[in-house]
Image (cartoon, coloured by chain):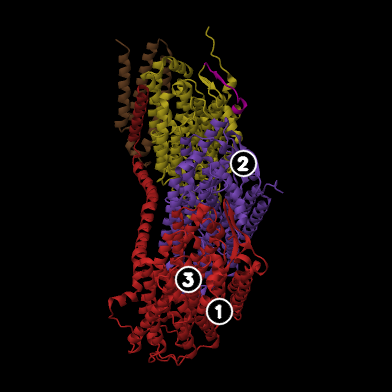
Chain colours: A yellow, B purple, C red, D brown
Amino acid sequence: MIEAPDLSLAALTPLLFVFGAALVGVLVESFAPRHVRQPTQVALALVGTVGGFVSTLLIAGRSEVTAGGALAVDGAGLFLQATIAGLAALSILLFAERGLDPAKSAFVASAAVPAGSPRDRELLTDERVQTEVYPLATFAVGGMMLFVAANDLLVMFIALEVLSLPLYLICGLARRRRLLSQEAAVKYFLLGAFASAFFLYGLALVYGATGSIRLSEIRESVSTDGTGTLLVLGLGLLIVGLMFKASVAPFHTWTPDVYQGAPTPVTAFMAACTKVAAFGAILRLLYVAFGTADWTWRPLVYGIAIVSMVVGAVLGLTQTDVKRMLAYSSIAHAGFLLTGVIGLGGGTGSGLSATLFYLLAYGLTTIGAFAVVTLVRDGDGEATQLSQWAGLARRSPLTAGVMTFLLLALAGIPLTSGFTGKFAVFRAAIEVGAWPLAVGALVTSAIAGFFYLRLVVLMYFSAPAEDGPSVGVPGLPTTIVLAVTVAATLVLGVVPGSVLDLADRAATLVG
Amino acid sequence: MSDFPWLLAMIAVPAVGGAAVAALPRGRDAAAKQVALAVSGLVLLLAVLATVAFDTGGERFQLTTSVSWIPAFGVDFALGVDGIALVMLLLIGVLVPVVVIASWADTGPEGRSMKAYFAWLLVLEAMMVGVFAATDVFLFYVFFEAMLVPMYFIIGSFGGPRRQFAATKFFLYSLLGGLVMLASVIGLYVVSNTELGEGTFAFDALRQLDIDPGVQKLLFLGFFVAFAIKAPLVPFHTWLPDSGAQAPIGGGVLLVGVLDKVGTFGFIRYCLPLFPDASRTFAPWILGLAVAGIIYGAILAMGQTDLKRFVTYTSIAHFGFIALGIFAFTAEGGTGAVLYMVNHGISTGILFLAVGMLISRGGSARISDYGGVAKKAPVLAGVFLVAGLASLALPGTNSFVSEFLVLLGSFPTRPVFTVVATVGIVLAALYVLLVVQRTMHGPSRGVVVDKPFPDLRRRELAVVVPLIALIIGLGVYPQPLLALIDPAVAATMTDIGSDPAGTTPATAEQGAN
Amino acid sequence: MDPVPATGLLAVSWLLIALPLAGAAVLLLGGRRTDRWGHLLGIATVTASFVLAVLCTVELAGTSGRSVGVDLFTFISTGRLDVSAGLLVDPLSMTFALLITGVGALIHVYSVGYMAHDPARRRFFAYLNLFVAAMLLLVLGNSFVALYVGWEGVGLASYLLIAFWYTRPAAATAAKKAFIMNRVGDVGLALAIFLMFTQLGTTSYAGVLGSVGLLAGGTVTAIGLLLLLGACGKSGQFPLQAWLPDAMEGPTPVSALIHAATMVTAGVYLIARSAPIFDAAPVAQTVVVVIGAITIMIGAIAGCAYDDIKKVLAWSTVSQIGYMFLAVGLGPIGYAAGIAHLLTHGFFKAGLFLGAGSVMHGMGDQTDMRRFGGLATKMKTTFVTFGLGYLALIGFPFLSGYWTKDAIIEAAFDRGGVSGYLLGGVAVLGAGLTAFYMTRLMLLTFFGKPRWEDGVHPHESPAVMTLPMVVLAVGSVAAGFVLVQLAPLADWLAPVFGEPEEAAAPAIPPLVVSVLVTVVVALGALTAWVFVGRREVPTTAPARVSLPVRAARNALYADRVNEAVFMRPGMWLTRALLWVDDRGVDGVVNGIGTGLGGSSSRLGRAQTGFVRSYALGMLGGAVLVAGALLAVTAG
Amino acid sequence: MTLTNYLVLAAILFTIGAVGVLVRRNAIVVFMCIELMLNSVNLTLVTFARANGSVDGQVIAFFVMVVAAAEVVIGLAIIMSIYRTRRSASVDDANLLKY
């Protein structure tokens, strides 16, 4: 008689909530009549994500390893899960926006129809929408939340796939510019699969070296019989796999293409949530499994951080597409986040809470920024060309103002959440003596400042372009998103105290 | 009376006022002006009352307000002023209303509504007050950076033809410096964390730290770069001519008159007291830059063909004097330097305004387009001359006292640098009189003939008269300001290990030993 | 030595300065409203302070020690520096005060007529008042700082007055030149003050002059030389003499008051005032006398060659001030003599200028002497007064110049030794040259055939102009006798310079000296008559002249030198720096920007859009990562 | 015969797969190469499982297969859609997004 592994359902509520919602969503998709699907699916997805969010708050403070040691439910995990769920809820709202596109949805009516075919053209304006995107997204959210709680390389891998596979799909579901969208999907898929192969091989090597895939056990074996070549190689490959998801240079190459090609709400979702999830996993891997041997990977991460910041900042300078520009900005931010990871020191530094806060702040701001992108439209969908934004401030001061504020936050100007986050992570880095890294980061953020500024200059100081884009009137969902993100960006910049304390209290990793 | 939160009020009033102006419906420019004038006038009143409430004999920092802001970082929202900051607040209080009146008739490029301009002016005022009134380094930094935003929009939206370039250059250059400083700010916090057990940003606490010299050097450089860009010292100056030339006159006045002072203020408020050893180590180099700036700025000023650029280059020369006075580490030099900050704000302010009045008539900033203005607009010419004389530090004008003090104070410790700097006063005469001759004297030429070129109007007189009054008044009787500044500088000298009482005469020393 | 606090009338001696200053303020701020009565106010204020000066002098004479201090308010007090705005009323300062206000008042009166037709007459009087105020501050101030303030104040006034007719480019340029060259001198003065503060911690006369003894020899010399630099700038002494003749672009009363009688003598005052310093610094003194001697010659030589009546007088001023420098450079025996000459010179040179002005007035503002001639009959008063001034200047026996100049020459010889003879010789030679060029001037202007331009009808000037000339003429005749014989100035100034000491054994008996001088002067005059008086004078200066004459016409190329040494390199430097700033400093800044942009687009190429190259990138990255980790663990 | 050989073989297979991804144009083939990499990992896993004398590795291998299958579904769907649009499965043709 084998007894079942301990399973603390309470600790798993968030996950159960989200996955439950996703599964129900599948059923709805297959059985509910078409006209009720859209509202039902949106409702379901929101219930799932918001429910997940709330339940994490309810069980906040728990710190245990459960599911037979496969899952670690701890402060950091819950904080990240909450962040993911919350950001996901906002993204879902963006998905659900029906006011902007004349066809009432950003997603393709029928993905199976070849792009550009007569049928496709007639479907373009058809108000019929496919709703599979909601359960898919919900599954991805579940995968992400699982990812950050994984206490076991296998679970981590499964979670990785669970969050990736739906994303691959929904990247290709744009209603307009379908060629770009599909190309983005293909690229994301192939490269993602390629990366997960690396991750998997790393898993295998680590398993071979330590005889276990449980993070805690890896930690023990590392501290007892040191780090052999096999183990180190494994670690390297695992890092590659995770860095890919976090879009850290030099594994960033997919990011700009996919961000540009994917439907903007999806881009927002990926930019915010995927990053959070990936960094959650990175933190776990590096500190729970390899924290005692941090001397092995610290120099590497140090270097990668610099590369990522420089690549992001420099390549961003000459972008001509807003979404692409934001993609490079997200690469640079990945670098800044890594300074926070460095700042974790021997796991004691303030780096963990700093990183948690930064992820939250960055996620909110970036969703807001993409939300604004969805507003600025011309004849065929969103006007993402920088040149089209010229003189936007005259057309719609409010939109321009919101965008400017969010950009300043991304640039890290004081009184915005971006500044608080930067301050936190750089402080962490300097505390552990990594001041050259911090200085480098600061210089690169000055460089990055240029391209954020470029957009501001265009919007405010340039004469409006002829036949420029119109600013759509956002429906309720987008309005909520904008309100929340802007408010949060401001609050986290002006009175971040409480949230910082929260992150501080949450900053524990078990396993 | 002194427990009223003067400083908080001086930040809140313009901030709220700015928001109010921004909230006005489109096209209500007239209302915007009136509100802006009223608000800035109120701030001036507050500044004066605060000065009355300030006790020169009392604590170093007074009128303090402090509430915990971000406990996680040990940051307080702490305000307070010593004499140095207080005189700067007075300067702000005076200049902003003047600028508002001076910009009364301005019209934005491409027919922009000037409403935003006045809103930004008020926001800028709030930020400037904050930057001088902060006694918490983090808070100081926040204002230091946030201050860029309004000025960025003032230049970028209401400036000259190349305003986009100028605004971006201004913002990025300053941002770069600021971020480098941020590294030092954090470093300072970390040091305090290790020394005091819990990190703090409170200036007075940080002043007590004794920091390992090596670390001091690094931290000092971080702060120095930011301030050297802000001030600006040669060779970090090239953003100023661009910004100054493109900025609208009002913005230019505040940019050169107040914003740049944040740099020199930073030297004396933060660099010296926090990093005495490093300051002494680097002093020779900085003095080199300062003196180079005096000569370099003056010579370049002579070579300028654009009136606004001319003014900015004269300022670069003046900032050299200020830095000289600060890094000479004598009470006289320091006091002179601080007084210089105020005086330069006034004298360059009026010079900039006079230039603006010229340009508003001639419609050109090229020096060569003018000539013989004195014939057609004698009063304007007179004002320009007075401004010029003030900027060449003629005795009887305010600048003389400060420049004289700076040189006299620097001579005992740094004779060589001072001698070179003193040559600068000849160059100053040269560049001022050159421009006066080209534009004001000789037969009327260029736009002076083509355009109507009326003499000063009532509103314009209202702009210049108070400034001229200050120029003469402070030139004849600077003592009140000196009395304010003296104790603060003395305290700084104690921090850096110089004799707070001033320079001991060489002969007296011989007598002593 | 320390001045006693002021009482009675002296306590309000600050009114001396305040009155003209108030006048200036009213006239400048009042604007056109004051046009009608502006000039009267100007005269009133100056006259008032003259009267006050007289009364003060009388009272001062009564006080013991004849040195009274007036403390007004604290000007600058910070650190160890404590400058109080205060006055020092003593024989020296009052002597100057009298000269300034007296001659000043006369010239104000004269200007009423001279500027009658100028629309900006009010402004003119405002500036004149401003000048008088600044000059009085210069001489009455009780510290070197106060002196410095007045020093630059008069500089400003002179700038404004030279550029009074600013629409003339020449005037504007001359004014600028004057101010700049003065500033060069001011640098010296300023540095001297800094040095005093560094060494003694004070800048007041009492403090500094009282404790010269504490200073090291080198320091004293340094201070002395720096002060001298300042003096040279103000007084148009070598090497800073070039601005003074150009300053004649200003209206003639200005030349008379500022550039002849008062301001340019400030240098002499400075050196006399700092007597203790110079007495303690023989080297500095030597430099003073040498500069004095050189300047005597430069001025005299240049004076011989010019045809512009005002410029000749200007060069003569330069050379006469050279005499004064020579005198004060000689130390105790010379101070009184120098001041005496300064005063008499004030009278006759002012008179000469006013005369010249009167001539120009009658000749339609013509200044070229080759266009004058035969005016003696046309303008009798002018001729007589001018003639008296002329005689006084060349040292015609028993007129002012005779007494004071001879005293200086004697003192020069009394210095003894080679240097004594050298200096004395130069002085005598200078006297001869003076006689030459002044006689030439007289002949060209008042004698010979008329060479007037057509349509010029010379006429005597109105009484308001001639009256001051008459007064000054009287001064030119009598002042010397009064100051040297009747009521020796030396005794009056004793409290400042100490009791006058007679040279133990005069190298050459005074009588011999005066005879010698008189003879040389006569010779000079005769030569002039031989060269100029007997012949027909061409109305245009002959082009083909001997080298020395050409050199003299170019004022010994002083301007050329300035141009070659300062102006051209300066312009070149400016251009060079402009380039450096634009391409160099700013080039780097902008270059970084463009460079980043360029590298950005170049790196961007790596983002080819091909999945397979992305995969390659990732594989490469993976290899690097693995390599790095292995390197770390292995190493 | 030692287990090392298996590991080496797996490594070689992995490399072949990786190189294949780099050199082949046809999306399907590229995808198959990735599958090859996954399976090489499986081989590694089971080898280590034997070496460590635990079954974990083999269990993991099963998981991997399942995941791979899922990947196939998604992948083929995506590739199909783009193929139907472009009438070509060459990954090099999907090149609109760059720089």
State whether discs 1 and 3 lie on one chain.
yes
Q: Which of these two is toward me, B482 or B249?
A: B482
Give percent across and percent down for residue B389. Answer: 51, 64
Label 2 sits on a secondary structure element that is strand
Which segment did they paint magenta? A56-68
Q: Which residue is mark 2?
A: B77
Spatial separation of the CA atoms under disc 1 and disc 2: 65 Å
Amino acid type indicated by mark 2: Phe
Q: Is residue B436 above or below residue D58?
A: below
Task: Using a 10 Å C-alpha cutoff, classify the residue at mark 3 as few (fewer than 14 neighbours), some (14 to 19) or many (20 or more).
Answer: many
**Above/below status of C306 relative to B505:** below
Task: Name the chain under label 2.
Answer: B
Residue B215's x, y, as percent? 47, 35
Q: Is residue A60 magenta?
A: yes
Q: Chain of mark 3?
A: C
- Of mark 1 and mark 3, the one earlier in the sequence is 1
- Whether residue B455 is visible, yes or no, is no
| Most distant residue in the right direction | B1
Q: Amino acid type of disc 1?
A: His
Residue B146 in magenta stretch: no
Q: Residues within 10 Å of mark 1 (few under 14, many from 20)?
A: many
Residue B420 vs C269, above or below: the answer is above
Q: Secondary structure at mark 1?
A: helix
Relative to B165, is D55 above or below?
above
Q: Are marks 3 and 2 in contact (CB under 8 Å)?
A: no
Distance between the alpha carbons at the discs numbered 3 and 2: 69 Å
Q: Nearer the viewer, residue B438 or B24?
A: B438
The kind of secondary structure element at disc 3 is helix
Dot 2, crowdedness within 10 Å: few (<14), some or many (≥20)?
some
Tag nearer the camera, 1 or 3: 3
* Mark number, residue C108: 1
**Residue under label 3:** C338
